Every structure is written in C-alpha cells, then in structure tokens.
Amino acid sequence: NARAAGHDAEQVVDALVSFSRYAVPQPLLVDIVDTMGRYGRLQLVKHPAHGLMLVSLDRAVLEEVLRNKKIAPMLGARLDDDTVIVHNSERGRVKQMLLKIGWPAEDLAGYVDGEAHPIELDQDGW
C-alpha cells in the first residue's frame, strides 16, 4: 500500500525505525526493501478490446506466475510473451495472490465511475 501511494522503501524503513518502540529486526527491513523493489514489474491494465490484462515488465516473473498452481487457474489466455488476460471477477484475488508470492502488482486499470448515491447522516439525538 505504501508503494502504491508513492512512498519508496527508504521512506518506509525510516518511518518504521523512527516510530517503532523497539528495534526493528534487520531481516524485516531487508524484506520490505526487496518486496517494494518488486512492485510494478507486474501491472494490471485495462485494454479496450481485451479488458483486464496482466502485463509483465520481466518475462521471467510472468513465467513464475503462470507456473503457480493457485494463480494460473485465475488467469485467461496469454496474448503474447508478456501479457495474459485476467477476468474482471478475479482482479482482487489475483492481486492478493501475487502479493503472497512476492510480486505485488501495480494496478493501473482504474475503476468505472458509478452513479452517485445520495446519502445523509441522521444526526438526531447527537
């Protein structure tokens, strides 16, 4: 979440070290730097003809993902060496599974703006 919000690994590590009551274990800091460095090698993008796609900036990473027994069934057809279709209903699950295997995807697909729903807070009795 921090990386998606525009923060880099150095900022996250500095914040943890600065605000932690106890010493932060070095292996945790290394893991944070490593995982944040992997962010964005896989991207979820929207294509006008193909819909939601997973695009890899590193072909070896996509090959690893396609071999994963839990993720592969959630993916659709492979369009080329670096691109595979993702069904819209699997978007969240694919992102969660990619994070679990250490490849957090950058979600560039956006969402469809819906119709505004008027809602008011009932403040009676406050």
Image (cartoon, rainbow, N blue to C red):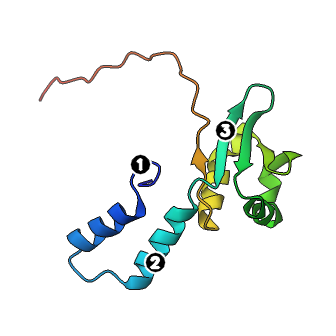
Q: Amino acid at mark 2?
A: Val
Q: Quadrant of residue 16?
A: bottom left
The image shows residue 53 at horizontal and vertical percentages of 74, 41
Q: Residue furthest left?
A: 126
- Going by the numbered disc 3, the residue's amino acid type is Val
Query: Are dots 2 and 3 in contact, CB under 8 Å?
Result: no
On the image, numbered disc 1 is attached to which residue? 6
Pinpoint residue 114: horizontal percent, then vertical percent.
Answer: 53, 20
For label 2, the crowd category at 10 Å Cα-Cα, with few meaning under 14, some 14 to 19 and many 20 or more, is few
- SS category of the residue bearing label 3: strand
Q: Which mark is residue 30?
A: 2
Nearer-N-terminus badge (3/1): 1
In the rendering, at what x and y percent does residue 124 appear? 16, 23
Disc 3 to disc 1, C-alpha distance: 18 Å
Where is mark 3, residue-wise?
45
User: What's under tag 1, amino acid-wise?
Assistant: Gly
The residue at the point 84 percent across, 46 percent down is 76
Report if the CB atoms under discs 3 and 1 are less than 8 Å apart. Answer: no
Considering depth in this image, is 117 or 123 the residue closer to the camera?
117
Q: Is residue 78 visible?
A: no
Mark 1 Cα within 10 Å, few/some/many (few <14, many 20+)?
Answer: few
Q: Give the quadrant of residue 77.
A: top right
Question: Which residue occupies 45% across, 16% down?
Answer: 116
Relative side of 6 to 103, left or right: left
> Residue 39 lies in what quarter of the image?
bottom right
**Circle 2: element type:** helix
